[in-house]
Amino acid sequence: MARSLGIDLGGTALKWVLLADGSPAEEGTVPTPHDGTAAVLAAMVGLAEAVGTVDAVGVGVPGLYEPDGTTTLLPNVPGAWEGFPLGPRLGESVGTPVALCNDARAFTLAELRLGAGRGCRTLLALTLGTGVGGGVASAGRLHLGAHERGGEIGHQVVDPAGVRCGCGARGCAETVASAPAIVAAAARVVWQGVGSSLAEACGHDPAALTVEVVAEQARRGDGHAADIIDRAGWALGAALANATTILAPERVVIGGGVSSALDVLRPTLERTLRERARLPDPPPVVAAELGPRAGAIGAALWGLEPEEHPA
């Protein structure tokens, strides 16, 4: 029975899942150390030692890395990550090869194999949270492209006159549909004092706003909250329409923290997708099934599928 450990490296927590014969057998979460790369590496080694002998290890990372397992940019994880050989060092410590995968691509692989994308040959996936991550599956396999950076659906420009994105471009879908973007738009409404129920919902403290608060006020009919949610749905629909026109996926899977608002995002998202993709049958948009552990599951699967990795 093959055993694979998957670790989802986040700025707050290390989520881990042990797969036994392709199915989740154990899982857990530990805090991410905030005192440097060596401490994060030691925590990962400790996780591997605690679960015992494994055949493979995969790590989902929230950023960029080189094919040799060296990280280049992990902006939300404290530490000096540029040029850090995370894969090789972890592999040396645990005695098995370690495969890195972008966390959104790991999410995509998990949903493709074990979640809402089961049975699909071509799939688009989005994770909505601090950013808008994405992934693509083609011919039943995770598609990474050159430099293993394919699938950044959230970094399509949907508004050339929009605000500057963290990636350096202007008007990416992420600048409108990420959790910080939605909360920032709601905070502007509160500061303006325009009579929205958002102010009462957050106790007149913009710092208390969350996506859940904005979504709930939209459900209750607050026009300002509805406009914010509709604009996020429009940005996601436009980005997905572009990708759909090229890839013609069978399904779109959406997960991440912001997906709790999928019920209010869906009408504008699906209308924009339908109008822009110009397909007789736009792909169904469905909620992810695997929850917060999807990234760790995908990382574990990636570790077990060396034939999928680019040479």
Image (cartoon, grey):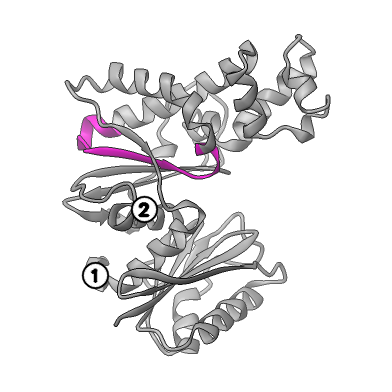
Identify the residue at horizontal 57%, vertical 15% (top origin).
227
Query: Tag 1, which secondary structure?
Result: loop
Question: Is 163 part of what is drawn in magenta?
Answer: no
Checking the image for residue 129, the label placed there is none
Query: Tag 2, which secondary structure?
Result: loop
For this view, does 102 lie left or right of residue 215? Answer: left
For this view, does 99 lie left or right of residue 10? Answer: left
For this view, does 209 lie left or right of residue 162? Answer: right
Question: Is 253 part of what is drawn in magenta?
Answer: yes
Amino acid type of disc 1?
Ala
First-in-chain label (1 vs 2): 2
Identify the residue at horizontal 55%, vertical 82% (top origin).
45
Amino acid type of disc 2?
Arg
The span picked out in magenta is: 243-259
Q: Position of residue 253 (x, y in %)?
A: 36, 41
Camera-side residue of 147 and 36: 36
Q: Position of residue 273 (x, y in %)?
A: 32, 23
Camera-side residue of 33 and 226: 226
Checking the image for residue 149, the label placed there is 2
In the depicted structure, whether residue 297 falls above or below residue 179? below
Residue underneath mark 1: 311
In the depicted structure, whether residue 10 falls above or below residue 26? above
Alpha carbon separation for disc pair 1 and 2 = 14 Å
